[in-house]
Image (cartoon, grey):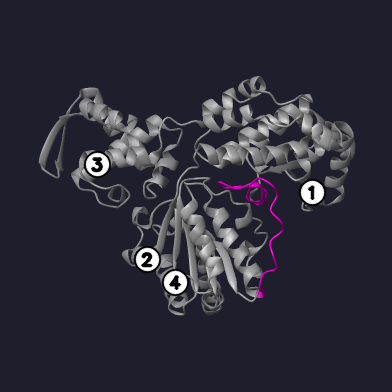
Amino acid sequence: MQGTIMDEGSRTAGPGAEAIAEALVGRIGPQKYRIWFQSCARFTLAEGCLKIGVPNPFMANWLESHFLRDIKAAAHAATGGHPTISFAIDAELSEKRQRPAVEAVAAAPAGPRKTAEAASSPSSKGLRLSLDTFIVGPSNELAYSAARAVVREQHSPFNPLFIHGGYGVGKTHLLQGICNGVTEARPQTNWLYLSAEEFANQFVLALKTKKLEAFRARLRKTDLLAIDDVHFLASKPSTQEEFLHTFNTINLAGKQVVLVSDAHPKMIGQLSEKLVNRFVSGMVVKIEPPDFQTRCEICRQFAQRMVATAFGDSKAAQAGAMSEGVVRFVAERIRTNVRELEGALLKLVAYAALQNEKITLAMAQSVLAEHIERCDPIVHVCDIESTVAAYFGTTAATLHSAKKDRTVSLARHFSMYLIRKHTKMSSSEVGRAMGNKNHATVLVACRKVEDLLQRNEDVNWQGPHGNKVVKAQTVLADLEDGIAR
């Protein structure tokens, strides 16, 4: 018998899970349960194992560190046994809790009614993010304006609209906001939201089950096709060809296509030239990481929401309110993206709630010291790529391509080496960021550069003004000096 926490209100289903939840409430109290378990955890009890789904690693570490003993006691009290307890990242919870960039943290209202076609797709359900909860700043103003135009105009001038940027800067928020905004403005609109991975999986399934025509009809009859994580199509020629035909059909019919990716179309490695040309034929806009003022506004709204939830009544919430000094401290120290801000603020508010103390600057400095050290990178990937590309006389797009001439290979190797050195990215993450290369390619590149540096060999490449020969250590010093600027 398996019970899974599914309900938004109680997050419990099934006798075993319900009993454990009730026992846990009795041990830790309803306030702490509401903060940490009601909408942040999913219990699954099966065959003597209690699996706790959580939205992110931070939540898993926090629950395990602070509530594992209570969970074990509640499980024993409810079941009479000692089930094995494990924590796992739950994709659905993660999607519901994400506020990817420059957005207000106040809970967005439930998504408006969808058309029958859109609702038939699993990916189209529960789109909770709206444009109304998106905080606009200099880093995302153009992308936001383009998204508003798509919602406002039945035939927008931005078709396709291609939004790209780093992790956690608001791409998915805008994409879901467009879908919900279009539904509210024109309820009859037939839209479909899915990720490129879902597109690929459904395409393969349609081929295997010989339902390709039904698959094509469902996608190509939409008025608005919204695709997330387009870079997933890289290195999949058959899927790219199918997507190209889908794109052409929708585009020629005058319908809207909105696409989201981590990189500019020309910087997605192993993406067909035909698709790249289609993507850049419309509006391509980048979202940068939020600036200081935008981060401050995000912190204010997120903190306001979290404090109200954690402290309960208005008097307690007012006592636990976050001062402007704390807001500025967090916004100054965490600069990369909103997900990092959310994790830091969640940790801070939770600590204050558990201690029943007011949030002070001293508390923030103490509680977030390790978090800030871990999250604050020295440099960004785009800084490294642009510096290396300029130094070797090539382009960042070329670094992501499949070209293997001496100059490009050298530039690519030094880029991978510097990214591994100056960021917390793993070899697999570096490979994905640089045109979907595998982790072994990154490891080999780093070893080659390390060997060049150890022996300080001459580095030869063909620059814009002819052949260049520079010592390896000098090359590294020049590149790091350029990145530092």
In-front residue for pair 119/99: 99
Q: Depth-wise, is mark 3 or mark 1 nearer the camera?
A: 3
Percent across and percent down for residue 144 are 51, 56
What residue would you read off at disc 3? Answer: 390
| Secondary structure type for disc 2 | helix
Percent across and percent down for residue 479 are 27, 32
Amino acid type, mark 4: Phe
Q: Depth-wise, is mark 4 or mark 1 nearer the camera?
A: 4
Q: Residue at x 42, y 29 (%)?
A: 378
What residue would you read off at disc 1? Answer: 11
Q: Depth-wise, is mark 4 or mark 3 nearer the camera?
A: 3
Percent across and percent down for residue 316 are 82, 32
What residue would you read off at disc 4? Answer: 247
Is label 1 in contact with label 2 (beta carbons under 8 Å)? no
Q: Is residue 264 left or right of residue 13?
A: left
What residue would you read off at disc 2? Answer: 275
Q: Is residue 152 left or right of residue 362?
A: left
Is label 4 in contact with label 3 (beta carbons under 8 Å)? no
In-front residue for pair 150/389: 150
Is residue 330 rendered magenta in the image?
Answer: no
Q: Which contiguous range is marked in magenta?
A: 92-116
Q: Earlier in the sequence, mark 2 or mark 4?
A: 4
Q: Residue at x 52, y 40 (%)?
A: 337
| Secondary structure type for disc 4 | helix
Label 4: how many Cα within 10 Å (few below 14, some 14–19, many 20+)? many
User: Can the viewer see residue 106?
Assistant: yes
Q: Earlier in the sequence, mark 2 or mark 3?
A: 2
